[in-house]
Amino acid sequence: MNIIYTGKQNDFPPQYREKLEGKLHKISKMIERKGEKEAHIIHRQERFLHVVEITINMFDHRIVCFGEDAELLPAVNIALEKLDKQVVKLREKWRDTKRHPASPPELESAAEPESKPGKSKKAQIYRVDHTSNGRKPMTLDEAIMEMDATRNGQPDYLVFRDADSDRLSVLLRRRDGNFDLIES
């Protein structure tokens, strides 16, 4: 991490610089991916207060932290603590943002040929119908009569509990008008 000092540079003794650079190096591990980051450290003295400002750019955001104290080292530590909290918060926010999948996976059979590269695939939208299990068991004849009664606009199948065997059954209407029965 490149560190640029501005302001009263002579007030930073070598021990303070080593501590500051060590802590910034730890923070830079959370920030850096590919490339160098820069930290701008501005020190100014207002009356009896040392004001330390640390500025870092991270994920296209500028993080600015201030530390004020009567002595230089506590002011630097306050600014570094604030910087650490902001970096952790921004990194978690960046990591936890909701990412949208490209599109739902499409089901293809092995027998179908690959699509041409020039054509784009459209996302399939699936509809799920939920029904309650409040129906009483019915016979096969009752199921056929119910499918005939609800022929328009309803799916060509009916799931019901068989009254004779008390097992789940599926009645399917074929395209020729006949029925198939699947028993569990």
Image (cartoon, rainbow, N blue to C red):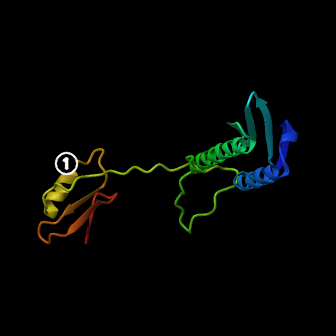
* Depth check, front residue: 54 or 45: 45
Q: Residues within 10 Å of mark 1 (few under 14, many from 20)?
A: few
* Depth check, front residue: 6 or 153: 6
- Residue 21 screen position, x and y as percent: 79, 52
* Depth check, front residue: 10 or 110: 10
- Residue 22 screen position, x and y as percent: 77, 55
Q: Examine the image and state in which quarter residue 52 appears.
A: top right
Question: In this rendering, would 96 be left or right of 173?
Answer: right
Which residue does the image show at 72% across and 43% down from the upper left?
A: 76
* Depth check, front residue: 69 or 130: 69
Which residue does the image show at 20% across and 56% down from the upper left?
A: 133
- Residue 113 screen position, x and y as percent: 61, 63
Residue located beneath label 1 in the image: 149
Which residue does the image show at 66% across and 50% down from the upper left?
A: 119
Q: Examine the image and state in which quarter residue 160 appears.
A: bottom left
Q: Secondary structure at mark 1?
A: helix
Asked if residue 140 is positioned above or below residue 19 in the image, the reply reads: below
